Image (cartoon, grey):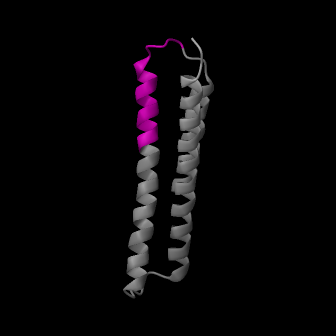
């Protein structure tokens, strides 16, 4: 399973957890799990970008085991994972703003 598939599955799991009704407001275990999952997803995006950067440098230096197709594919995966992360961030910020604007 590729890193992108893994990240999409993690994001779906987070969305399913968020959709489920919380049992209590002081449930820190679920908050910790969400934070861990979010950090893991960000680390995977960073890893994809670092891998793409490394492959690009290897191709630029003329290493024979690195071909152009691998470089382009790696760059596209890194770009797609970053775009996905940005969209998730936008949704989280939007949800936070919506919660902050609620009247109590």
Left or right of 90? Residue 26 is: left
67 or 92, which lies in front?
92
Q: Is residue 51 visible?
A: yes
Q: Quadrant of the C terminus?
A: top right
Q: What residue is at 41 percent from the left and 84 percent from the top?
A: 60
Q: From the image, give the main secondary structure of the stretch colored magenta.
A: helix
Q: In the rendered structure, does residue 25 fall within the stretch colored magenta?
A: yes
Q: Hey, which quadrant is residue 97 in on the image?
A: top right
| Image x and y of residue 101, in percent | 58, 23
Q: In the rendered structure, does residue 57 fall within the stretch colored magenta?
A: no
17 or 84, which lies in front?
84
**Above-or-below relation of 40 to 68:** above
Q: Which residues are magenta?
A: 23-39
| Image x and y of residue 34, in percent | 46, 32
Count of all numbered marks drawn on residues in the image: 0
Q: Hey, which quadrant is residue 64 in on the image?
A: bottom left
Q: What residue is at 54 percent from the left and 37 percent from the top?
A: 93
Q: Quadrant of the N terminus?
A: bottom right
Q: What residue is at 43 percent from the left and 82 percent from the top?
A: 59
| Image x and y of residue 99, in percent | 56, 24
Q: What residue is at 38 percent from the left and 71 percent from the top?
A: 54
| Image x and y of residue 20, in percent | 61, 22
**Above-or-below relation of 74 to 68:** above
Q: Is residue 6 visible?
A: no
């Amino acid at each position: 399973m590729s890193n992108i598939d893994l990240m999409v599955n993690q994001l779906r799991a987070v969305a399913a957890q968020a959709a489920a009704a919380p049992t209590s407001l002081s449930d820190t275990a679920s908050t910790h799990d969400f934070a861990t999952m979010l950090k893991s997803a960000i680390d995977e995006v960073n890893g994809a970008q670092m891998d793409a950067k490394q492959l690009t440098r290897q191709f630029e230096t003329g290493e024979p085991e690195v071909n152009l197709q691998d470089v382009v594919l790696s760059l596209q995966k890194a770009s797609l994972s970053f775009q996905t992360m940005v969209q998730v961030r936008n949704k989280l910020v939007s949800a936070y703003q919506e919660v902050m604007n609620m009247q109590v």
